[in-house]
């Protein structure tokens, strides 16, 4: 056999081998494609059969619905969730409490929407992830919040009622005068309900499914602008006129500094009791005679300083025409009696001493 014949046979063998290998590869490819199509179809059909199935581990308002189809989940939530919500919300502030029932609050829940969200959460992953999770027991840890609607007016009404009961006005420190002295009244902080937080808390509790449906009233304190430690500096001077004892008590920074004997208004022209303040002051004042019957011929006139002027040395007005003034030494005998036409009479040395320490605006309490 010659060389050319051998070469021809080898070439033919190589062609037949290549053809055989090509046919086998093509067949393998077809089989692989077919298997892939079958697998994909199986995955699709499996996933489609579970299109409304909620993944294990998913709950709605704390109620487990995993492994349930949409209709079964709705039925369970209607039964279990509504029973959990059908309890009043209690609002507490110390020992006081208020309640708001679900019917009074007009509470309704959208079960269909919550179940739809649970299904959507279950199908948010890829089809392969969902299939793997379904075949091998995977789960999600998701809780769908309760979708509740309620009467906002009912919540506002309850909030207003609680605010009226709990709110407390701030009280600044003050001075309480009496005939015998001054009493310091301590400040007290105010209390204000935080209405926005309270309303939000009630709304949250109305849709809460746990065992506790109680809201604590949120409040904050209001600090007083004036405390008892600030009172002394607020009152550098203070005058109490004790008519029954015929005494004028003068206080400096709320401490008794001096006590003076006085005369006050006679019967029918009494020194009017009440709370006043020094309105104006004058040295050696003229007398602006009131236009009254008791003034006689002098009514409506002005008597200049001098022997005829009954207002001696100093005058401190606290009630319009009525004031504190000195009198002629010849009338010192009226001190300790009801003798004036409404003013407060003092001895000249006493009124001069008082005048120098009494600024305009000084409180005057006539008891």
Image (cartoon, helix red, strand yellow):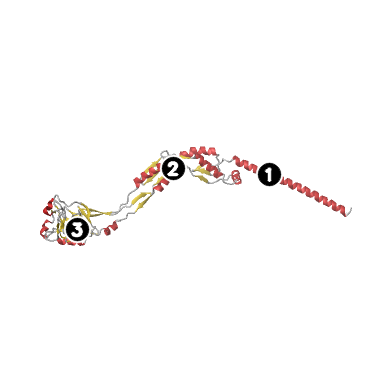
Q: Give the residue at x 65% y 42%.
A: 41
Viewer-side label of 3, 1 = 3
- Quarter-wise, where is residue 184 in the image? bottom left
Q: Secondary structure at mark 2?
A: helix
Upstream in the sequence, badge 2 or badge 1? 1
Q: Secondary structure at mark 3?
A: strand
Dot 3 alpha-carbon crowd within 10 angstroms: few under 14, some 14 to 19, many 20 or more:
many
x, y (%) of residue 169? 32, 50
x, y (%) of residue 51? 58, 41
Upstream in the sequence, badge 3 or badge 1? 1
Circle on res. 206: 2
Q: CA distance from mark 3 to mark 2?
A: 66 Å
Dot 2 alpha-carbon crowd within 10 angstroms: few under 14, some 14 to 19, many 20 or more:
many
Circle on res. 35: 1
Q: Secondary structure at mark 1?
A: helix
Residue contact between numbered discs 3 and 2, judged by CB atoms under 8 Å:
no
Circle on res. 316: 3
Q: CA distance from mark 3 to mark 1?
A: 115 Å
Does residue 187 appear to the left or right of 364 in the view shown?
A: right
27, 278: nearer the viewer? 278
Q: CA distance from mark 2 to mark 1?
A: 55 Å
Upstream in the sequence, badge 3 or badge 2? 2
């Amino acid at each position: 056999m010659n060389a050319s014949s051998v070469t021809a046979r080898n070439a033919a063998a190589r062609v037949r081998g290549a053809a055989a290998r090509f046919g086998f590869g093509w067949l393998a490819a077809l089989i692989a494609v077919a298997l892939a199509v079958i697998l994909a179809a199986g995955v699709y059909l499996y996933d489609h059969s579970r299109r409304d199935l909620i993944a294990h581990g998913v709950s709605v308002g704390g109620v487990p619905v995993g492994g349930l189809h949409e209709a079964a989940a709705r039925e369970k939530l209607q039964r279990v969730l509504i029973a959990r919500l059908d309890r009043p919300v209690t609002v507490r502030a110390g020992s006081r409490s208020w309640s708001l029932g679900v019917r009074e609050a007009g509470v309704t829940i959208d079960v269909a929407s919550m179940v739809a969200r649970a299904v959507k959460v279950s199908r948010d992953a890829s089809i392969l992830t969902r299939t793997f999770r379904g075949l091998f027991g995977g789960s999600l840890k998701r809780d769908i919040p309760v979708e509740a609607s309620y009467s906002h007016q009912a919540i506002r009404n309850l909030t207003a009622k609680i605010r009226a009961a709990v709110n407390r006005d701030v009280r600044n420190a003050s001075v309480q005068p009496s005939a015998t002295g001054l009493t310091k009244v301590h400040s007290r902080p105010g209390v204000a309900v935080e209405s926005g937080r309270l309303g939000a808390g009630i709304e949250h509790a109305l849709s809460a499914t746990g065992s506790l449906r109680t809201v604590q009233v949120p409040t904050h304190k209001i600090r007083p602008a004036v405390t008892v430690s600030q009172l002394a500096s607020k009152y550098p001077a203070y005058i109490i006129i004790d008519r029954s004892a015929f005494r004028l008590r003068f206080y400096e920074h709320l401490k008794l500094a001096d006590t003076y004997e006085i005369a006050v208004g006679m019967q029918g022209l009494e020194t009017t009791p009440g709370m006043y303040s020094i309105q104006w002051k004058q040295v050696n004042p003229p007398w602006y005679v009131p236009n009254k019957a008791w003034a006689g011929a002098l009514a409506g006139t002005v008597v200049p300083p001098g022997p005829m002027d009954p207002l001696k040395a100093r005058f401190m007005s606290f009630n319009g025409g009525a004031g504190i003034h000195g009198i002629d030494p010849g009338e010192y005998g009226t001190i300790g009696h009801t003798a004036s036409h409404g003013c407060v009479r003092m001895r000249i040395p006493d009124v001069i001493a008082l005048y120098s320490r009494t600024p305009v605006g000084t409180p005057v309490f006539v008891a």
